[in-house]
Image (spheres, rainbow, N blue to C red):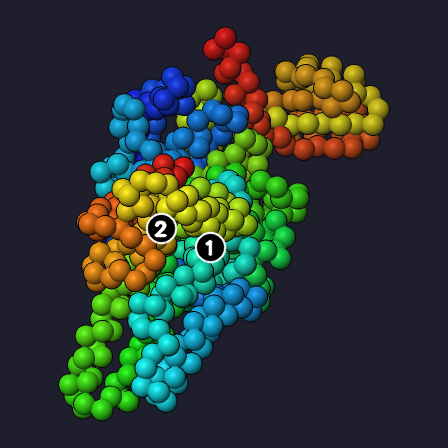
Amino acid sequence: MSEAGVIHDIGYQRYQGPRLGRGALLQAMYVHGLRAAFGLGRSAKSKIFPWGVAGIVLLVAVINAGVRSQTGNWLFDYYQLDDTMSWLVIFFAAIVAPELVSRDIRSGVLPLYFSRPVRAADYVMAKVAALVSAVFLMLGVPQFIMFLTGAFTTKTGMRGVWHELGLLIPGWGYSLLWAFIFASISLLIASLTGKRAFAAGGIVAVFLMTAPIVGVLNVLPSETAHHLSGLASPISLISGVEIWLRDRTDLGLDIGNLGPIYGIEAFCLIAACLLLLLARYRKVASL
Amino acid sequence: MTIIATQALTKTYGGGVTALADLTVEVDAGVIGLVGANGAGKSTFIKIMLGLIAPSSGSLRVFELDPVAETDKVRARVGYMPENDCLPPDVSASEFVTHVGRLSGLPKTAARERASEALRHVGLYEERYRQIGGYSTGMKQRVKLAQALVHDPDLLLLDEPTNGLDPAGRDAMLTLVHRIGNEFGISVVVCSHLLGEVERICDSLIAIEGGHLLRADRISSMTAASDVLAVEVSEGTDELASALRTLGFKVTPEGRLLLVPLESDVAYDRILQAVADLDLPLHRLDQRRHRVAELFTAKETADV
């Protein structure tokens, strides 16, 4: 025990300040994850990819905005932006998800987290929130730029701005759906391995390999098989949900009147991935 | 002050493996050595103290708190340094320790201040801004210790802190642990399978084997009244032995040494006088404490 009244030169100072609760802890982990997603606070090398992808999407949106301001028409609307950029989103998730979770497994840092007041649920929540935000930012910010162009070039004043906002909000919702689907699937895959390259390969494989199944189902002679084919791949699942909610028929996928099934699967897929992720980390948290 | 108290603590894993059996022990504040061979149940004991796993039966109180029911309160007061490599290679030590500090509930600025404080206390100064991947094993062990200290715990649980260190690094780490226990006023549980290094720095010792408590006591009471004087003369060893025996000492020859138990304060002078009377060239005269290990060996054979 240190003696009272003795002042050491570089003595140890006890901490008397406040200790924050679970909310602050979640926030710290979330911000840390979001920064890691974009390589902030990391080496320049880890910034190249996320900012490269974000830059491309942004550039596309700016070109699109330029076309709109010159001709008055979009090259593609808010939804089509997400669909067009789907491959970039896949690669983004495939790089960032391992960065968020595989890295922690690899370096063995999890015992340090879980010996603090961090629970498996906190960890999963913070990581999912970070990746969802990162993907959403990647799509939502370009969408917002498109909105600004739309709002500034409108010829009907405030009404035009409101109209444009009415288009942007569901567009953001659509981006959020993308973000949730991609984040939950890729985090689940990434949480299974400590090797980043394996995790990235696995994520891309899941999104790539399921696409041909949709094609195969579509050449089957059964009408129902055509309608259900989109369920086989996450990307066509998202299109299916869009077709259902927006009553579209021109998106190259015929879902018949099975739209609700797409909605249910999307929801169940996200929920199942998150629950599996939680189960995985409950096991890890007990070391 | 009792900081850890267990009552018939038992942990049986799924496959019927008993890691801890009927462990009842009370530990006072200070530096505590937890010794036992690999697989003796040391790590299980630590995990139970951290509330990472629940005991199968029996009870455990850390600072009068139950780690299962009041996990967060216990963890706020306990710092844990794991045995394995547990540091991300691509961030700087200062950033990493700040981050884990925040995960212990410190506000942002406080976490940053305490992180550099903790790193300074373990002896990392300018290096702390470099990426951990480039550190030596010794520096990594220091970072691991700093991250356990950052939130100012009242108890540190160190799992094999000297693992993988060279002799100089070992000494430095042990000195550091001793300082934390004595100057910082933080109790420390040091896990080790090397009795020799633990006994140098600990106030008390818990020895477990196969999940059973072998012995728990203060070091001073384990080694009390068991001092031995080792005498070495370059010639006339036998003469000295017989001279000492006539003086009433129980002399045990050990190689070229004579071991003489020191029963009283005057014994030392009398032995020295005997050497001088015989006019023998004295090589060595050193007071040996019984090593704790010897006590355990005796105890174990008694058990068998």
Q: CA distance from mark 1 to mark 2?
A: 14 Å
Q: Residue at x 25, y 55 (%)?
A: A241
Identify the element where label 1 is drawn. Answer: helix
Q: Residue at x 76, y 27 (%)?
A: B232
Indicate the amino acid at tag 2. Answer: Pro
The image shows residue A108 at horizontal and vertical percentages of 48, 45
The residue tagged 1 is A94
**Crowdedness near tag 2: few (<14), some (14–19) or many (≥20) residues, C-alpha within 10 Å:** many
Let me know if residue B40 appears in the view: yes
- Closer to us: mark 1 or mark 2? 2
**Which chain is home to disc 2?**
A
Relative to A19, is A47 above or below? below
Q: Quadrant of the C terminus of chain A?
A: top left
Left or right? Give the position of B254 relative to B26.
Answer: right
Label ID, residue A234: 2
Left or right? Give the position of B134 relative to B36.
Answer: right
Nearer-the-camera pick, B44 or B272:
B44
Q: Residue at x 31, y 57 (%)?
A: A239
Q: Residue furthest right?
A: B235
The image shows residue B123 at horizontal and vertical percentages of 55, 58
Nearer-the-camera pick, A239 or A132:
A239
Identify the element where label 2 is drawn. Answer: helix
The image shows residue A77 at horizontal and vertical percentages of 31, 73
| Mark 1 or mark 2: whose residue is earlier in sequence | 1
Label ID, residue B209: none
Q: Residue furthest left?
A: A159
Q: Residue at x 47, y 58 (%)?
A: A91
Nearer-the-camera pick, A218 or A5:
A218
Q: Are marks 1 and 2 on the same chain?
A: yes
The image shows residue A55 at horizontal and vertical percentages of 46, 74
**Which chain is home to disc 1?**
A
Relative to A116, is A133 above or below? below
